[in-house]
Image (cartoon, grey):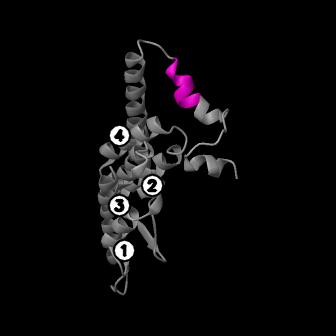
């Protein structure tokens, strides 16, 4: 799983380097280290190594988040929305902030029209991107609904899994220490 995340990080960094060269006026080297260093930096991160050794499910969530951005940066809105749906299913709160920016990114990288470039900042007119973003959000919501429906069928046509999988995560009822890094962030 970590190798797949590193490949996705490499693709995102490579796409960023290509985009930075296209928008750079001087045409010089934007990144000294390049995409390979980004992937190596991820793989050699002590938290990634610790998560791998602990066989944590958090790596799957990381894969779905990074794959969402990687597909969106390649202009592939459908697979990106699918990865966003999986990410929402695995951890329901954090990926909500990713859905609309990923839709705009997939629109922009697909070549969805001219973007305004001012002072190295690229802006996409929302009036042109709005139909694509609405389709993207709809795809992500449909994928999330399909995953919830599959869980409903898997649990013997019972909705009991909703409380333990989603409501308890949002309500933060149990803050006892565990080995997860999120506990330390929430209790600070």
Query: 183 or 88: nearer the eye?
Result: 183
Q: Is residue 166 magenta?
A: yes
Residue 50 marker = 2
Which element is circle 3 on? helix
For the stretch drawn in magenta, the main secondary structure is: helix
Which element is circle 2 on? helix
Q: Which residues are magenta?
A: 160-167
Mark 3 neighbour density, 10 Å: few (under 14) some (14–19) many (20 or more) = many
Task: Identify which residue is drawn at 42% across, 32% down.
Answer: 144
* Mark 2 in CB contact with mark 3 (< 8 angstroms): no
Please state the horizontal and vertical placement of residue 83, each as a whole percent of the image: 36, 43
First of labels 1, 3 by sequence position: 3
First of labels 2, 3 by sequence position: 3
Between circles 4 and 2, the one closer to the viewer is 2
Task: Identify which residue is drawn at 43% across, 34% down.
Answer: 141
Placement of 33 over or under 11, stated as above or below: below
Mark 1 neighbour density, 10 Å: few (under 14) some (14–19) many (20 or more) = some
Between circles 2 and 3, the one closer to the viewer is 2
* Mark 4 in CB contact with mark 2 (< 8 angstroms): no
Please state the horizontal and vertical placement of residue 131, each as a whole percent of the image: 40, 44
First of labels 2, 1 by sequence position: 1
Q: Which residue is mark 1?
A: 20
């Amino acid at each position: 799983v970590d190798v797949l995340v590193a490949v996705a990080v490499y693709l995102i960094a490579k796409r960023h380097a290509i985009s930075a060269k296209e928008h750079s006026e001087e045409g010089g080297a934007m990144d000294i280290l390049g995409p390979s260093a980004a992937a190596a930096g991820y793989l050699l991160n002590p938290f990634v190594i610790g998560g791998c050794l602990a066989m944590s499910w958090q790596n799957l969530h990381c894969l779905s988040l990074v794959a969402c951005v990687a597909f969106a940066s390649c202009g592939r809105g459908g697979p990106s929305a699918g990865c966003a749906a999986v990410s929402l299913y695995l951890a329901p709160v954090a990926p909500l902030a990713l859905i609309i920016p990923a839709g705009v990114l997939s629109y922009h990288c697909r070549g969805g029209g001219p973007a305004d470039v001012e002072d190295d900042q690229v802006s996409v007119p929302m009036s042109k991107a709005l139909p694509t973003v609405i389709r993207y959000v709809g795809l992500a919501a449909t994928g999330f609904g399909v995953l919830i429906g599959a869980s409903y069928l898997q649990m013997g046509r019972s909705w009991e899994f909703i409380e333990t999988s989603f409501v308890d995560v949002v309500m933060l009822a149990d803050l006892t220490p565990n080995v997860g890094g999120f506990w330390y962030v929430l209790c600070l």
